[in-house]
Image (cartoon, rainbow, N blue to C red):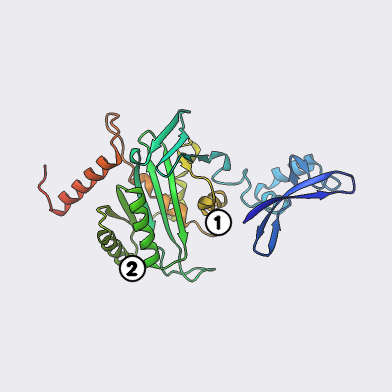
Amino acid sequence: PRVYNLRLPLTSGETQIMPVSVMGDLTVFRRAAIEHGRSAFPEKWSLDDLARIRLRDESLFACNYMNNPSDELTATFKTGWLRYYDWLGERQLTYTDAAGAKRVLGMNDLDVMLFVDPGGFAVRQTEDRARAAIVALGDDGHGSYLLLDVYSERDTFLACIEQICAWATRYAPRKVVIERVGQQAAFIELVRKALRDHDLTTVVDEVKPGKAHKEVRILGLEPYFQRGQMLIGRGPAFHEFRQQYTQFPRAARVDVLDTLAYFPQFVKRAASGVHKSSVQRQADELSAYRVRRGFAPTP
């Protein structure tokens, strides 16, 4: 959607400015009971009236008065928790970490992992198949995690595999972690074959959802956002993530958040403050994998 500011001249001589979104042939706008700190209908509700209504039922107020079911007061994940990084080029980015330190890092300074939910065919109320989701995450080794890229499409397994190979080439991840449920075992083998065909030695790990419901697993992300440890990029590539983030748990889809929720299980805890490069980490991971498979002698 393209966003514009629409000017509305009133008979009182005042001009209101209202943001509208243009999507195709439609112009979409949302009015709320409180806009710019003022009551939109003061002849009906004063700010004190609206405050009393809000205290009685915050969720009802967010939905029926503010036209925003994910109002900041009722949202699980707060918009104010979101922090951003900026690209300085294709291979370098800058951000301010949770401690307030300004950092400039290259891609080789990050421990990158891809987390994948292949989706597949499942019971959905509005879609004929579950969406595939891929999240590229970079760990700076100092307690900050950078959401580098997000993919969420109702697409074929082949398209999802092509996206994994493209990101494995671009980001050189230490490993690809794929959710395994039912028919997804065959998908994982296809990913391994596709990576070999692209001459990529990235390790592929499997993870099972376990017994915990996905909403419970997603709630495990809350401290990372609240403490300012999770950073996201800007622009339309992160629109789907922001939508799921602000609307959780009322969002129609949570595939991106559910996929991201696996990352705490695979974060490496830095030992003795030593920060390895991504090339060193990938080599260590590959060596450990070969030992497990019996392809190399144990050192």
Residue 209 in view, yes or no: no
- When asked about the image quadrant of residue 2, the answer is bottom right
The alpha-carbon separation of the residues under discs 2 and 1 comes to: 26 Å
Judged left or right of residue 284, residue 177 is right
Q: Quadrant of the N terminus?
A: bottom right
Residue at 54 percent across and 48 percent down: it is 235
Q: Residues within 10 Å of mark 2 (few under 14, many from 20)?
A: few
Residue 123 position, x and y percent, is: 47, 69
SS category of the residue bearing label 1: loop
Query: Sequence order check: which comes first, mark 2 or mark 1?
Result: 2
Judged left or right of residue 143, residue 56 is right
Between residue 151 and residue 3, name the one nearer to us: 3
Q: Which residue is mark 2?
A: 183
Residue at 45 percent across and 53 percent down: it is 150
- When asked about the image quadrant of residue 164, the answer is bottom left
* Badge 1 amino acid: Ala
Q: Residue furthest left?
A: 297
Residue 289 in view, yes or no: yes
Q: Which residue is mark 1?
A: 251
Residue 281 position, x and y percent, is: 26, 41
SS category of the residue bearing label 2: loop
Residue 261 position, x and y percent, is: 42, 49
Judged left or right of residue 112, residue 11 is right
* Badge 2 amino acid: Gln
Q: Residues within 10 Å of mark 1 (few under 14, many from 20)?
A: few
